[in-house]
Amino acid sequence: MTLIETIEKHKLMVAVRTDTPESAYKAAMACINGGIRLVEITFSVPDADEVIKKLRKETGALIGAGTVLGIGNLKKALKAGASYIVSPHLDEDIVKLTKKAGAVSVPGACTPTEIYRAHIAGGDIIKLFPFVEMGGPDFLKAIRGPMPFIRFMLSGGVNLDNLPEYLSAKSSCILIGSAILKKEFMQAGAYDSITGLASKFIRKIA
């Protein structure tokens, strides 16, 4: 199974964005213990590359890097073993180097022009961000008319209640963050609660 096929099989990816590497690791492990198999450590996390490296070593989950804005962080992510590189924007150089390294490239785009540019640049899956503000599932339906050959990641706005609607859009992947890593759970260090919530998402997908 290819990396893209694995992403499409598991569907739900969690973006971990915390203030410390320790909390990022604990949050990621809580999600993995709840059944999540796609975990993105954002480069807003201090020492994100070290967290990626540790998770790669200790778990069977597919670990990627998020908020990769420049080549410096890209190189750190790839060296740490990130399986996929996610950005909120399109940078052709990031896409090119990601593909050269054999990782999955997930650049962000917002307009039809950006989406097509990201695709022809080599993006494997195009991250629609910010998805809700763009128009949500209706936007995706419209954009698929002229571009049915593009794979999409839906980023933003998903929760347990509207998850079926997101799944019915038949994207390659759904990216989720605060709906699982709830602020109150993170502040309280309630990682068991995060595991429980992750399990609910996985059961609903199943």
Image: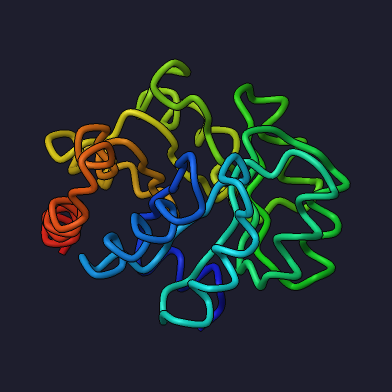
Q: In the drawing, does residue 162 fall left or right of residue 73?
A: left
Q: In the rendered image of this protein, does residue 12 appear above or below residue 134? A: below
Mark count? 0
Give coordinates of residue 182: x percent, y percent: 24, 37
Q: In the drawing, does residue 132 fall left or right of residue 92?
A: left
Figure coloring: rainbow
Which quarter of the rendering shows the C terminus? bottom left
**Residue at 53% of width from left, 76% of height from top?**
56
Q: Quadrant of residue 118?
A: top right
Q: In the rendered image of this protein, does residue 99 appear above or below residue 176? A: below
Taking depth in this image into account, of 64 and 188 the one nearest to the observer is 188
**Residue at 11% of width from left, 61% of height from top?**
203
Taking depth in this image into account, of 124 and 160 the one nearest to the observer is 160
Give coordinates of residue 23: x percent, y percent: 40, 51
**Residue at 76% of width from left, 50% of height from top?**
73
Q: In the drawing, does residue 23 fall left or right of residue 66?
A: left
Taking depth in this image into account, of 19 and 169 the one nearest to the observer is 19
Q: Quadrant of residue 30?
A: bottom left
Q: Quadrant of residue 180?
A: top left
Give coordinates of residue 17: x percent, y percent: 46, 42
Give coordinates of residue 173: x percent, y percent: 42, 52
**Residue at 35% of width from left, 49% of height from top?**
170
Taking depth in this image into account, of 129 and 168 the one nearest to the observer is 129
